[in-house]
Image (cartoon, rainbow, N blue to C red):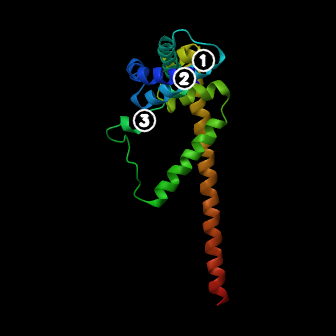
Amino acid sequence: MARNSTLTNLFLSTKRNMGRLISHIVKADDIDDIVQETFIKTYEADLKQEIKYVRSYMLKTAKNLALNHVARWDNKYNDSLEDFSQPPVQLTSGKVEDDYESKEQFLFFCRATDQLSGSVRKCFILKKVYGLSQKEIASYLNLSESTVEKHIAQGLLKSTKYIKRMNHGHSVKGAKQNHQVHSLQVKKTVLK
């Protein structure tokens, strides 16, 4: 029990230094999470084996956790809304129909990208959604730039065809529904 309280006291006295150390590596929002995770990792390690230099161990662990956090792919493309002074697009639409149509087009886009093969999908999404250059995509996926260019072109072609097909099918379905409604109205008028 004495070891645990010593570890806790040492953590509390080192907490500020850890935060300062990792503030140069991660965003301010992530500092507290990493510092807490550092305590947990240190506590777990201390339960398994006594740590001789606890303060050094904590600082090293905090630094490594921060570097791992930054290296994770999902954090590279995760921007906070607070980073934008103004939204890049208008966030509200003028009409309910526009909003519905926009969501429907986005759904078609998602379905279109699901139809693509693995490497084509990755290249296409990294280009169109994340806005990476072909050179960055080639480096990230360990592909040649010409292969990336071909994959993006193929993804664009197949996605466009899919979306056009879905839009055409949707407009034909809508026309049929309008015709059916009109037919029902005519029948009701005739029956009166």
Check disc 3 and give the amino acid type.
Ser
Could you say which is closer to the camera, residue 11 or residue 155?
11
**Amino acid residing under circle 2:** Arg
**Which residue is identified by label 2?**
72
Residue 124 in the image: above or below residue 187: above
Which of the two discs, 3 and 2, labels the residue nearer the N terminus?
2
Q: Which residue is mark 3?
A: 80
Q: Which comes sooner in the sequence, label 3 or label 1? A: 1
Q: Secondary structure at mark 2?
A: loop
The residue that disc 1 covers is: 46
**Observer-nearest of 76 and 33:** 33
The first of marks 1 and 2 along the sequence is 1
Image coordinates of residue 160 in percent, x first then y, are: 57, 38
| Residue 177 sits above or below residue 185 on the image | above
Q: Position of residue 141 (x, y in %)?
A: 58, 18
Which residue is more in the foreground, 30 or 7? 7
Q: Where, quadrant-wise, is the C terminus in this rendering?
A: bottom right
Distance between the Cα atoms at labels 3 and 1? Answer: 35 Å
SS assignment at label 3: loop
Q: Secondary structure at mark 1?
A: helix
Q: CA distance from mark 1 to mark 2?
A: 26 Å
Residue 14 image point, x, y percent: 42, 20
Characterize the local packing of mark 1: few (<14), some (14-19) or many (20 or more) Cα atoms within 10 angstroms. Answer: some
Tag 1: amino acid: Asp
Quarter of the rendering occupied by the N terminus:
top right
Give the residue drawn at x 56%, y 20%: 3
Locate residue 182, reporting x and y percent.
61, 74
Q: Within the image, what quadrant is residue 185 found in?
A: bottom right
